[in-house]
Amino acid sequence: MNKLDRTKPPEIINEIKFSLPEIENFDLSNGLNVYFVKKEKLPITQILMLTSAGSKYDDNKLNGLSHLTAALIDEGAGEFDALQLNNEIEKLGSIIKISSDKDFIYTSLLSLTDNIERSLYLFSKILIEPKLEPADFEREKKKKISKIIQLKDEPSYLADTVFEKILFNNSYYQLPVLGTETSAANIKLDDVQLFYQEYFSPTNSTLIVVSNLNSNTIVDLLEKYFSCWKKEIKNNCDPLQLNTKTKKAYLVHKDDLVQSEIRIGNLIYQKNNTEYLRQQILNTVLGGQFSSRLNLNLREKRGFTYGVSSAFNYMQSAANFEVSTAVKSENTAEAVAEILNELEKIREKITEEEVNFAKSYLIKRFPSRFETYSNISSNISVIITLNLDKNFLNDYLHNIKQLTTKEIITSARETIFPEESIIVVVGNRKVVKEQLLKIFNENLLEIEYNDVFFHNSDETS
Amino acid sequence: MANTKNLFQLDYRKYMLDNGLQVILYKDNSLPIVSVNIWYNVGSANENPGKTGFAHLFEHMMFQGSQNVPKEWHFRYIQEAGGTLNGSTSLDRTNYYETLPSNYLELALWLESDRMGFLLPALTQEKLDNQKDVVMNERRQRYENQPYGLAWEKLFSNLYSSSHPYHWPTIGWMDDIAQFNLEDVKKFFRTYYAPNNASLVVGGDINYDTTISLVKKYFEEIPASNNIPKLNYQSETLEQTKEVIHKDNIQLPRIYFAWHTDKIFGNDEAALDILADILTGSKNGRLHKRLLFERQISQDVFAFQHSGKLGGSFIIASTAKPNISLTEIKEEIFNEINRIIQEGINSEELDRSKNSIKSSYIYSLQNLATIANQLNAYNFYLSEPNSFLYDIERIEKVTANNIINAVQKYFKKHFVELKVIPK
């Protein structure tokens, strides 16, 4: 027997066959837009409702209202009080989760298909007839304020909050989703009830269903439980005119830290299918996966961090580029300098090999993005949250293959601006300040820990 | 609940190569992807005082390349193929896994076999120093720099005596990590990283015959190791209840309790899992209802059974709301535990917990990587990869009396009480 030659990776010959599941899109009689995908593997139904009711609709003084409304809608609904409702859901083995971000409130249901009728009934009650009662409101509000107090201990939360506040200064995106201790304390039950009335409607929501049932059965079930929900509301926020044009560094003092949390980034403006895909390739090269330039440099070469990544974050009316990491306090300034250096470098040169790697990475992992029921619904939700073309997933592979290295370099130059970046460091003053002053001089602005959360957002400049 | 038994009867094949490698194959052709998952029977429990954290540090070294795979290229090869990959270390074992398109199965086997058989020629001091830095940063990020991040190691180092291998955290003590040398790495590899100390699962879009011949091609020439040390520890009890106070950079104090209980797949483990769900698994969980809903003195509460090969523990923890004392929370927690003994468990809450545990099992079957890892886990702990149905039936068989008996058996003994309070 010949000895096995291990020196080269095995040759891959056969191509795999993958066909995208069919994505149906239709409206119910009350105007609720529905995406449906049939998946037969297991007797499971996954449902995700997106309601355009995120924290961007919060009034500054009542910041946190959207989040509190999301927390309260499943604390009793229809004929059930909070504990009864939870008991009914648990008995079925179903899971209902509610979360929110700056644009949307997300309500999801995971159910065994055998129990879908009862689960859907309870799910619809939460969306259509939440109780919103005083005792539940007081309890959830106190819980939320305590949560905000707890988050002040989390260096990563501090960094994210300060970064977004500065990046989206003077716009509705600067508000933290949870609000502040002061703003959350201002919220009254009336505010929640009004917020619910103004934003929860079939025409202001989109429903995604992934199930082993046929679409006809799903349509019948949805009509049965949702057609009584009739309200014409469509909420749109004005597009943003944002502008940050000077490089500025901010040091948030948290003197008990042994690592610094770092965020570096800038706003971007354009967004359509093509731009989005270019940015995905660019980000794969720069910081979107393990063997990216940033991670190989800061983790594998220098040992500054456990990990560093970059991302394009997209919201309905704005988007930004962002690098995030946590590094040993002693390495803070070096890490910031290395990141800025990588941002310069990627604007100058990206090789054909890097682009081919990124394309291969994105194209070949595409089938596994349809593995679980919730994988599928989150893929579809991206189309909605990013305002992408309805055929986005159908055209995905073809469109990625078309992109050229030149286009990716152009994309880097149009989206990454090291000279205009916002740099936020949350760190230990004694170890970090001197290091940062050497790079930024008078461009280093200091923020006391207590000022991050104690000021209302409209009081800072 | 409907009859879902057939979902839990997974078809699989198990082989052993001449060098002792256990191979488990599981076929599911619904998507063109495969999961490869290897368990090495070595975890932090195989370490010694002064050398803690080594199994985990070594896991990092396994991604640093091997004789035929340059540094960073293990990740690169798999990601270029559209795969995802990682590894993890626990008390009892270390695992490595990747999910990738099925036509790349051979690539995964090449990579896994190269580091199982040919790691040492590629090892350098520079790589070790780099990964020591990375792991120390991992420790800073997850422990030192994290609110309540040091609580687990405080809890377990008090629950287990200093000679018990569950005494230290999986990531190890910082001083120990800083002092590892190249000789430690070589010795550890030679001792534990051998085919007869591992099991390999290949699951997903495969053909049985082709896969077994590919596995043979890449793994059968790797020699077995002939002296793998066996671990054998007696279960421990506490001589007295220990109260520990830890000052942390936090605003809200938190209290933790830990009791010695049953080990993994022990007779009482299923009852303890259900007990945890009855206490804190939902809004109707007894402790959740009492502390967060009725009295509103806690911000959160959680309970779970944490078990390994050499022993298990039951943990309850709760964070106080502003201006609430931990003593008050403690009193309520013990009241609820006593109520279980005095008043029992009602059939509605027992059914609710069983149903939600069982549904979660079905939901977990959506994910091939989870199934592959579970086959390895069952094989490791029970010597039978397809124990899904056994595991579910274990939960279904638990009676209210089993739970009450478990509470009486374990919760009347000494325990560790840890208070994390603001600095």
Image: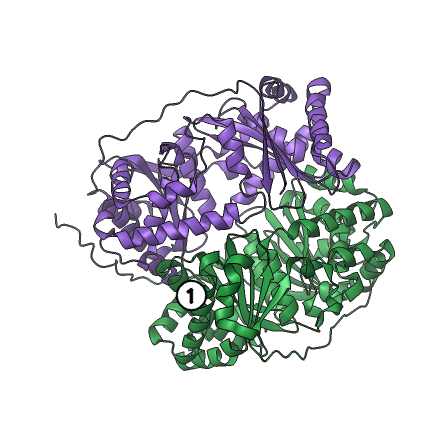
Classify the position of the N terminus of chain B by image quarter: top right
**Structural crowding at the residue carrying mark 1, measured as other residues with C-alpha within 10 Å and reported as few (<14), some (14–19) or many (≥20):** many
User: Is any part of residue B33 visible from this angle?
Assistant: no
Amino acid at the residue labelled 1: Leu
| Direction from residue B259 to residue A139 in the image, left or right | right
Eyeballing the image, is B143 above or below B236? below
The residue closer to the viewer here, B4 or B274, is: B274
Disc 1: host chain: A
Q: Position of residue A62 (x, y in %)?
A: 79, 61
Disc 1, SS: helix
Eyeballing the image, is A238 above or below B236? below
Residue annotated with mark 1: A294
| Direction from residue A418 to residue A45 in the image, left or right | right
Q: At x 45% / y 73%, what residue is drawn?
A: A343
Q: Colour of chain A?
A: green
Among the 4 quarters of the image, the one containing residue B14: top left
The residue closer to the viewer here, A411 or B83, is: A411
Q: Which chain is purple?
A: B
Q: At x 71% / y 49%, what residue is drawn?
A: A120
| Direction from residue B423 to residue B163 in the image, left or right | left
